[in-house]
Image (cartoon, rainbow, N blue to C red):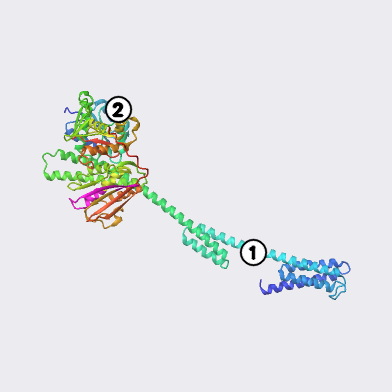
């Protein structure tokens, strides 16, 4: 409330008292002294609308005017009757009480108007923020709305809080959108890969078959022709292994659970070494497996992993160098190590990324090691590569036990 | 030509041509079918000595043909399948198929499988040979009457389970036996899911009869399917 309006409130208080006095004078003789006192109440009430100060002034002026003009002896402030003092006290008391009540009412009204304004502004902001599709839009809206009620700290805080909620919501929504997109792309990739692989398999089987037929019938063929046929067969088989890898990575990356059983790792190693007999030809393969070491794994997937690691070693190390396969049991896991005497690894853990190839010129899509990691991770285990003492690389894969080791099987020996 | 008749059930024409050419050039007679319907007709009409069956046929599941065939025929059936279809192979073998070939395969594998299958089919009809108590596979001589195994001239001590395993594989030498079949025949019908028993005993057996158990020459693992005792 500014100065001039405050002055007006006091003027209204004085005017009200004057009017009440005038009305009392006009009615004098026809009404009692008590009625004249009542005439001051509306004046006090009106003055109270101007606040606590004017209401107090009006009450005091009313008491003074009433005493001066109406209480005998008139036109003096003297009082004959002590009862008039009670009238003064009641008038003053009622006046101040009304004043303070009205004033309190007005404060509450102003506060509620303020609150309403803030709520409306906050609502407007929330609406804008909800409509926003980017974080930038939320911030713009916040800036715009805060300008309106800059001095209101509670409002600024509320806008800040709402903006944070809106930004959080946007982030969640965009994360969900991204995840959905990724899932869709992944699904498409999986479907494409497996259908392509199956479609490639059929002609590949026919090529392999026909080429071996030719080779068998080739009693009178030249060495060059035999070699060409051998190459066709070998390359078709290599292509087939790449397809198997593509399908394996599709399978493990689609989240299919490995079918785990307790398997002696020696069996898987034996099966993989047999299948790679030709690729590993001429190398010394050291196998060190503790008697009866079991692993809790999917035997088909782990054979695939081992084939890839061995094939990788065969491809990237000089012919004739040795390869060592070691198995060790720890209380809660089985560890499989493949150590070679090749050039070692420089790419670090990146060799397990898809389509990262070794530094030698050996062919390959760089998929084999990615498949290995996929298979290890699907078993909740892991794979690592480190330099080997004395040169070469050691690949280590571990498979945690997901159920207690079975009781050792008692020999049925008599 | 007077060779035995092989029925080739394969929907892919180039693959079928390869199979027919390879078989014909090795003295077999061949009947071919591109659908299951044709195959069923050909089977009743020609009474083949063996059937090569691709499981993924366009007009249905090859397994259905296998089951219907088994109602009246004991002719060996060799299933053709891809590497990542181990479950299909096991189902087919347990449903009465005799062996399988994983695509891609060459003529030598194809002929080896067919010869083994035909030999077992012949022996099946001649009890005198099955009664022979001595089974000879590779360097092993398995005396079923005396429960003795001699490898490279040395007597090897096997536990009763190991002996039963080896003898069973030797009686079906060259042929794959599924985990289920081995468990059923060695342990009995109640234990057919205890694959890990089988694996552990097989590992022990390898340590006794193989020169290098980590690189077996005879007791071969067929990943996800079972075991095979090589017979060449």
The reply to whether the magenta stretch includes residue A393 is no
Residue at 29% x, 25% y: name it: B72
Q: Is residue A61 left or right of residue B229?
A: right
Stretch in magenta? A309-335
Could you tell me which chain the residue with mark 1 belongs to?
A: A
Front one among A235 and B145: B145
Q: Quadrant of the C terminus of chain A?
A: top left
Q: Residues within 10 Å of mark 2 (few under 14, many from 20)?
A: some
Which residue, given by chain and number where applicable, does mark 2 sit on?
A: B70
The reply to whether the C-beta atoms of the residues labelled 1 and 2 are less than 8 Å apart is no
Instruction: Examine the rendered structure and indicate whether residue A34 appears above or below residue A376.
Output: below
Could you tell me which chain the residue with mark 2 belongs to?
A: B
* x and y percentages locating residue A160 in the rendered image: 52, 62
Q: Secondary structure at mark 1?
A: helix
Between the residue at mark 1 and the residue at mark 2, the CA separation in whole angstroms equals: 93 Å
Which residue, given by chain and number where applicable, does mark 1 sit on?
A: A111
Q: Is residue A144 left or right of residue A10?
A: left
């Amino acid at each position: 409330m500014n100065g001039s309006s405050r002055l007006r409130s006091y003027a209204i208080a004085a005017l009200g008292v004057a009017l009440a006095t005038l009305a009392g004078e006009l009615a004098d003789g026809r009404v009692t002294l008590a009625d004249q006192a009542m005439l001051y109440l509306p004046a006090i009430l009106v003055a109270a609308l101007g606040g606590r100060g004017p209401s107090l002034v009006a009450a005091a002026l009313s008491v003074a005017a009433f005493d001066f003009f109406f209480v005998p002896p008139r036109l003096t402030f003297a009082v004959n009757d002590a009862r008039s003092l009670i009238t003064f006290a009641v008038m003053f008391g009622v006046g101040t009480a009304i004043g303070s009540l009205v004033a309190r009412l007005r404060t509450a009204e102003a506060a509620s108007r303020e609150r309403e304004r803030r709520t409306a502004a906050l609502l407007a902001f929330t609406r804008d923020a909800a409509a926003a599709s980017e974080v930038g839009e939320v911030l713009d809206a916040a800036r715009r709305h805060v300008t309106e009620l800059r001095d209101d700290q509670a409002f600024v805080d509320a806008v800040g809080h709402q903006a944070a909620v809106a930004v959080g919501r946007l982030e969640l929504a965009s994360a969900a959108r991204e995840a959905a997109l990724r899932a869709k792309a992944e699904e498409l990739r999986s479907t494409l890969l497996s259908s392509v692989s199956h479609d490639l398999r059929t002609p590949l089987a026919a090529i392999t078959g026909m080429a071996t037929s030719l080779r068998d019938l080739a009693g009178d063929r030249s060495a060059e022709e035999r070699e060409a046929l051998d190459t066709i067969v070998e390359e078709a088989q290599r292509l087939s292994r790449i397809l198997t890898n593509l399908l394996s990575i599709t399978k493990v990356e689609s989240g299919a659970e490995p079918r785990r059983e307790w398997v002696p790792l020696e069996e898987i190693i034996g099966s993989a070494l047999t299948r790679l007999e030709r690729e590993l030809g001429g190398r010394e393969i050291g196998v060190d497996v503790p008697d009866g070491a079991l692993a809790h794994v999917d035997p088909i997937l782990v054979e695939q992993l081992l084939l890839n690691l061995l094939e990788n070693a065969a491809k990237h190390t000089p012919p004739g160098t040795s390869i060592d396969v070691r198995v060790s049991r720890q209380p809660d896991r089985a560890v499989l190590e493949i150590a070679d005497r090749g050039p070692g690894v420089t790419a670090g853990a990146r060799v397990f990324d898809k389509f990262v190839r070794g530094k030698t010129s050996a062919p390959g899509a760089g998929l084999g090691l990615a498949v290995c990691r996929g298979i290890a991770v699907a078993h909740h285990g892991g794979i690592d590569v480190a330099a080997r003492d004395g040169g070469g690389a050691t690949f280590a894969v571990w498979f945690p036990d997901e159920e207690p080791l079975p009781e050792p099987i008692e020999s049925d020996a008599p | 030509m007077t060779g035995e008749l092989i029925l080739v059930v394969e929907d892919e024409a180039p693959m079928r041509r390869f199979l027919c050419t390879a078989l014909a050039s090795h003295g077999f007679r061949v009947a071919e079918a591109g659908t299951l319907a044709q195959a069923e007709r050909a089977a009743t009409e020609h009474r083949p000595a063996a059937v090569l069956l691709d499981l993924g046929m366009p007009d249905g599941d090859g397994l259905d043909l296998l089951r219907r065939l088994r109602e009246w025929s004991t002719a060996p059936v060799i299933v053709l399948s891809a590497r990542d279809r181990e479950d299909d192979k096991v189902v087919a073998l347990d449903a009465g198929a005799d062996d399988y070939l994983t695509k891609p395969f060459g003529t030598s594998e194809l002929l080896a499988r067919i010869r083994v299958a035909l030999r077992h089919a012949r022996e099946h009809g001649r009890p005198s040979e099955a009664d022979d108590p001595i089974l000879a596979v590779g360097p092993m001589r398995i005396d079923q009457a005396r429960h003795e195994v001699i490898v490279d001239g040395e007597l090897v001590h096997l536990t009763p389970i190991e002996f039963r395993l080896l003898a069973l594989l030797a009686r079906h030498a060259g042929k794959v036996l599924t985990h289920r079949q081995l468990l059923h025949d060695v342990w009995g019908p109640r234990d057919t899911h205890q694959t890990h028993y089988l694996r552990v005993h097989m590992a022990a057996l390898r340590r006794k009869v193989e020169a290098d158990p980590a690189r077996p020459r005879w007791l071969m693992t067929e990943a996800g399917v079972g075991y095979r005792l090589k017979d060449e």
